[in-house]
Image: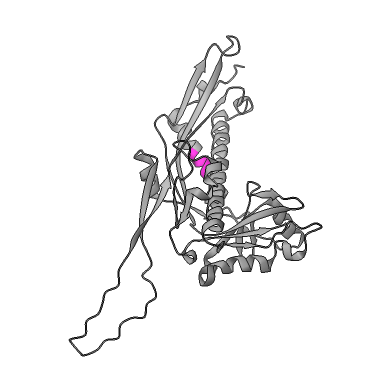
Amino acid sequence: MATVQIADVYNPLTFSQAEQESQVETNKFLMSGVLSMDPRLSAMAATGGNIGELPFYKPLGTAEPNYSTDNPAVASTPQKVTDAKMVFRLASQNQSWSTMDLAVELALADPSGAITNRIGSYWATNNERRVIQSAMGVLADNVANDAGDMVNNIATDAVGVPTAAELISSDAVIDTIQTMGDHGDGLGVIAMHSVPYRSLQKQNMIDFIPNARGEVNIPTYQGKIVVVDDSLPAIAGTNRITYTSIVFSQGAMAGGFSAPQNASELDRDPSSGNGGGQTLIYSRRSDIFHPLGFQFLSGSVAGQSATQAELALAANWDRVWERKNTGIAFLQTNG
């Protein structure tokens, strides 16, 4: 039986579409509703350039209204409607794999589907990490410039076993939500490292609800969807580890996608392997993932696109919405 080669199953259009569908189906932040795809961002991603703007109007405020009178000489003074903007940055990314990398998939009954699922899963994981690192940049900016008004930090670096007051708990999550004040009820998703998640499981605090197919496998805590991701920070101090959990509102992050020219491409290097040859498949993406209520300052970006490490820097972020209107809050615990 002849060996299946990548070239036998490769079609650039169908590969690009299948990769996109696969990464959507496996992106935990997209499936939970934290990340909402915005057609405006997708359109901007397709127009070229690496920096764009989303204009918005600031809230009208809470000033007491005028009281009507029958005196024609008394005129009202209109309130100003103030506009502002959120600045975002496009990430132009690519990755490639060789025949050897995909050898297992090529041996399966549906090699094309197996390869695109694997590549889609790669991009989904990458996208989740960019969402998390953007949130970490927002956290760093908040601590540096806004007195940490989005953060409930109950972690310490003391010697000894953490106490109950330093671990994730119902009270700790409620206090975190309270950083949103009377807008806290809009926070419907909590992302956490597997360590605090297992701690809650041991206490029988995790419930499960059905997914779209009726399978009861979506974890919830206090009625909030739980996203478990070990890409969330677990920072080792001298004595303890500090875990950062994030409570999100639905649609707290906006996303956009555009397939660049030659989004998927096949190449052959006949000289590789001392003349044995090697086939390569390339995948390219143009993505935008942006926390609503913030602008990307590009204060510390070396290249055209911000790396994951650069997304986490305080110098690259600034809050432009009032705190209550930004659907993100942070909880730091020792487990």
Residue in the picture at 76% in, 62% down: 203
Point 38% across, 67% down: residue: 59
The one nearer the camera, 44 or 1, is 44
Q: Main secondary structure of the magenta part?
A: helix
Furthest residue toward top: 275
The segment highlighted magenta reads 20-24
Tally of numbered tags: 0
Q: Which residue is at the far bottom?
A: 70
- Residue farthest to the right, as pictured: 160
Q: Quadrant of residue 100?
A: top right
Position in image of residue 25 (x %, y %): 54, 45
Give the left or right position of residue 179, taking residue 204 as reference.
left
Q: Is residue 187 visible?
A: yes
Determine whether, in the image, residue 122 is placed left or right of residue 293: right
The extreme left residue here reads 72
Judged left or right of residue 229, residue 281 is left
Location of residue 61 with respect to 191 vertically, above or below: below
Residue 189 in percent (x, y) is at 57, 59
Q: Nearer the viewer, residue 203 or 315?
A: 315
Is 93 situated above or below 203? above
Residue name at image x 67 percent, y 69 percent: 171
**Depth check, front residue: 31 or 245:** 245
Q: Is residue 26 visible?
A: no
* In magenta stretch: residue 94: no
Query: Residue 134: x, y in percent?
Result: 52, 49
Q: Find residue 82 and report its horizontal and vertical position in percent.
A: 33, 64
The structure's colour scheme is one colour
Along the viewing direction, whichever of 288 and 58 lies nearer the viewer: 58
Q: Quadrant of the C terminus?
A: bottom right
Quarter of the figure that contains the N terminus: top right
